[in-house]
Image (cartoon, coloured by chain):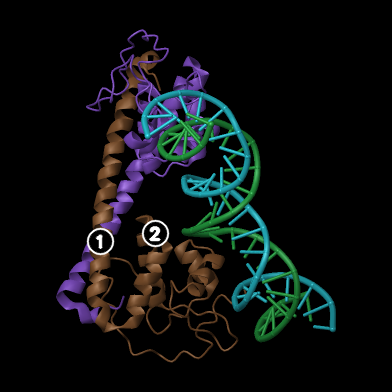
Chain colours: A purple, B brown, C green, D cyan
Amino acid sequence: MTQTTPVTTEETEQAPTRTDLCAAGPRRHPRPDGQDRYTISEVVAFTGLTAHTLRWYERIGLMAHVDRSHTGQRRYTNRDLDWLDLVGKLRLTGMPVADMVRYAELVRAGENTYGERHALLEATRRDVLDRIAELRDTLAVLDRKISFYADAGPQQPH
Amino acid sequence: MTQTTPVTTEETEQAPTRTDLCAAGPRRHPRPDGQDRYTISEVVAFTGLTAHTLRWYERIGLMAHVDRSHTGQRRYTNRDLDWLDLVGKLRLTGMPVADMVRYAELVRAGENTYGERHALLEATRRDVLDRIAELRDTLAVLDRKISFYADAGPQQPH
DNA sequence: TATGGCCTTGGAGCCCACTCCAAGCAAGTG
DNA sequence: CACTTGCTTGGAGTGGGCTCCAAGGCCATA
C-alpha cells in the first residue's frame, strides 16, 4: 500500500488545465486534471483490465508510451483513462486489436490523418449496426425456441 | 463435379415425411425432405462454413454423427442444416463452442433435459440483450466522435 | 536489517476456434 | 490404363488476445 497515493508527493507540474472535450459525456475522472498520475494498479481497479494487459497494450502500440515516475513506474493520466475507455468500447464491437493499433498510430501521426480516422470510425459504425441487426435476428430465433420449450417442449427437435 | 448430385442414385429410403416445426420461420431447405442427402461441399455452399470446420464440428460433438453413404462419405440432412443454422446464430452471440457442445449433448440426451436447455437458452437470450445494449452504447460514443471529426476535427484529442 | 508490497522487463506459454496436411480411397473420364 | 475430382482420417499448425514467469528494483514499516 505504500505506493497507492504517491501522486502529490512527486513531480506534479500542474498541467495547463486542458479541457478535455472528447468525452462530452457523463463519465467523470477519479481525480481532477493536475492530480492525474495513477499507478497501474489504480488503472486496473478503474478499467477492469489486468496489469498484464495494460503493459501489453503499451508494448504493441495500442497506447502511446505512458509517462513514468522517477523510479520507472507507470503513471497514467486522465487522458490515458479516456483512451482506455474508447479502446474498451471498440473491443466490444469485435474490432481486431490490429485495427485499434492502426487507429492509435493515426492519432499519434497528427492532424493530417483526420480523414482516415473519420473513415475508420464510419466503417466501425457500420459494423456495429450490422452486428446489432444480427443479434436482433438471433434474439428472434432464441425467443421462438424458448417459447417452444415453454409451451410445447416435447415437439422441439433441437 | 462427379459427385455433386449423387442423391437420387443412392439408397434414398424416403424418410417418414417428418414435419420439422422447429423452424416455424421463413427459411426453406434446398431440397425437400426425403431427397435431403447433401454432400459436404453442398453444405459448404449453403452455410459458408468450410469442409474442415464441418468435419471438426462433428469431431468435437457439436453435431451428432452425420450419416454416411455406402462409400463412407458424409450425407447431411435438412435437419443437419437446421442445426448448423442454429449453431451459426449462437456463434454470432459469442457463445463459446464448448457451451454449444454442451447444448448439443443435452439435445442428444433426450426429453429429460428440457429444463436445462430452456435455462441455457434463457441465459443466452440475456447475454444477447446485454450485448445489444453494449453495442448501442458504443454506437453513441462512435456517433459523438464522428460528428466531432466532421464538425470540429482539430479539437479532437483522440 | 529484513520482510513485504508493488512495480519493472523480455520472452515464453496458453486457450480458442479454426485451418491445414499427408496419405489414401472411390468413382468417373480420355 | 492413368489421371482427376471429391472425399476420408488423425494429427499438427496457426493467429489472435491475452496470461504468466523469472529475475530484479524501490521503498516503508517492524
The answer to whether residue C3 is above or below residue B1 is above
- Secondary structure under tag 1 reads helix
Residue D26, placed above or below residue B8: above
On the image, the x and y values in percent for residue B114 come to: 24, 77
- Nearer mark to the viewer, of 1 and 2: 1
Q: Residue at x 25, y 73 (%)?
A: B116
Looking at the image, residue A106 lies above or below residue B123: above
**Residue drawn at (36%, 31%) of the image:** A42
Mark 2: amino acid: Arg
Task: Determine whether, in the image, residue B151 is placed left or right of residue B36.
Answer: left
Q: Are marks 1 and 2 on the same chain?
A: yes
Report whether B96 appears left or right of B6.
left
Q: Report in which chain the residue with disc 1 lies.
A: B
Q: Residue furthest left?
A: A151
The image quarter in which residue A93 lies: top left
Q: Amino acid at mark 1?
A: Ala
Q: Position of residue A149 (x, y in %)?
A: 20, 73
List the residue tagged with mark 2.
Answer: B91
Q: Which residue is mark 1?
A: B123
Instruction: Say which of B37 and A23 sits in front.
Output: A23
Q: Are marks 1 and 2 in contact (CB under 8 Å)?
A: no
For marks 1 and 2, give the CA distance. 15 Å
Task: Mark 2: give few (<14), some (14-19) or many (20+) Cα within 10 Å.
Answer: some
The numbered dot on residue A156 is none
The location of residue A29, given as percent across then percent down, is 28, 24
The percent coordinates of residue B11 (x first, y second) are 50, 91
Using the image as rendered, state which of residue B87 and residue A119 is in the foreground: B87
Q: Residue at x 49, y 62 (%)?
A: B49
Observer able to see residue B65: yes
Determine whether, in the image, residue B120 is placed left or right of residue A122: left
Marks 1 and 2, the one that precedes in the sequence: 2
